Amino acid sequence: MGLTSFVPLALGLVMFSFALTAVLIIPFIDLLFKLKAVRPKEAPKTGKVPLFDTFHDQKAGTPLGGGILIVAVVAVIFYLVFPFASHMGVYIRSSFDFKNEVAVIMLTFLAFGFLGGLDDYIKIFGKPTSGKLGLVMGMSRRTKFLLQWLIALVIAFIMYRNLGIEFIHLPFVEKNLHLGIGYIPFAAFVIVSFANAFNITDGLDGLATGLLLICLLAFGVIAVGNLDTPLLVFITVWIGALLAFLYFNVWPARIFLGDVGALAFGATLGVIGLLTGSIFALMIIGGVFIVELVSSAVQIYGWRRFNKPILPLAPLHNTFRVLGWEEPKIVVRAWLVGVMLAIFGLWLATI
């Protein structure tokens, strides 16, 4: 790759992406207010208010859709950076076919972002519908889930067909498990799982964004080890934009990602894990996201199987709120857990 020549570019990309997002985000917040694109209230107007809705509606009225800005900034910079990099004498080296790898990254980022944006639009400007577990805001769960799988299967097929990925690396035993065409449903499952895991985690101010930054720093190190320039460029641009966004997203948040960011970011994190071949490292580095997803699945199972909750409130970060933990304390402690998991995941990726 010519790592020494890439370092100035990488640092410059972080700073440029940060500066551009920082300049645009305040006018963007004002625009969201003018468009009335704010987080709606979900509590029923009559009857007992569920505890989840009580917590949720404390944040009602905050602009929703910060993911639109980040997706746009990252996509534009990522598209324009490679001609500029060649003029700087940076050797572009990819672990796969360059165009197909870039296509996979951008397809994931933009397609899941579009799906999330559609869900946000219906959530903000549409009417809620009744579901088994309460009011459904936005697209129906079944429709959104099926569309996620459709997009993920297309991405997984491209990875299998065009990039030639069909195995997962097994740490400790130093072997590769070849899945053949079975890699397609496996990769799609990873993508959909992380899309929903991130979305579920994105419930406290700064929680999901901070954890994502930690994950990206870890995978940036892995991308350097893999000599994968396109992936490293994308990660550095993404980190810069997220740093600027996090300044306005920490408690008390002035803007939220919305599903446009949550679905795009979670799915793309899953794809990064697949592209680096570090699936087990991904499970460790993104461990907090997985725990949050599992806690919600356990809660749904409890309601459907026993007609009562297993946890005080799901996902897990809400359980800590019920126990009396302050929101900033939950977020910072989750970040600390994320840092330790990232260190462990990096170690796992090197053996």
Image (tube, grey):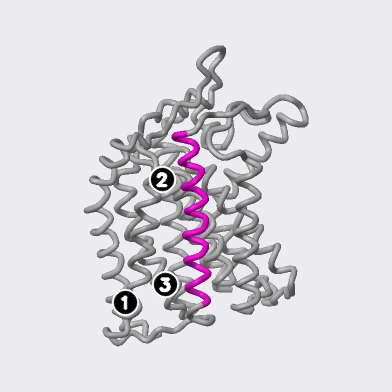
Mark 2 or mark 1: which is in front?
Answer: 2
Give amino acid for label 1: Val
Marks 3,1: beta carbons within 8 A: no
Residue range of the region highlighted in magenta in the rendering: 100-125
The front one of 274 and 351 is: 274
Q: Residue furthest top?
A: 47
Q: Earlier in the sequence, mark 2 or mark 3?
A: 3
The front one of 171 and 51 is: 51
Q: Quadrant of the C terminus?
A: bottom right
Residue pointed to by mark 1: 7
Q: Quadrant of the N terminus?
A: bottom left
Give amino acid for label 2: Leu
Marks 2,1: beta carbons within 8 A: no
Identified at 42% across, 72% down, the residue is: 232
Give above or below for 34 relative to 241: above
Element at label 1: helix
Q: Is residue 72 left or right of residue 325?
A: left
Residue 257 got which mark? 2
Q: Earlier in the sequence, mark 2 or mark 1?
A: 1
Q: Earlier in the sequence, mark 3 or mark 1?
A: 1
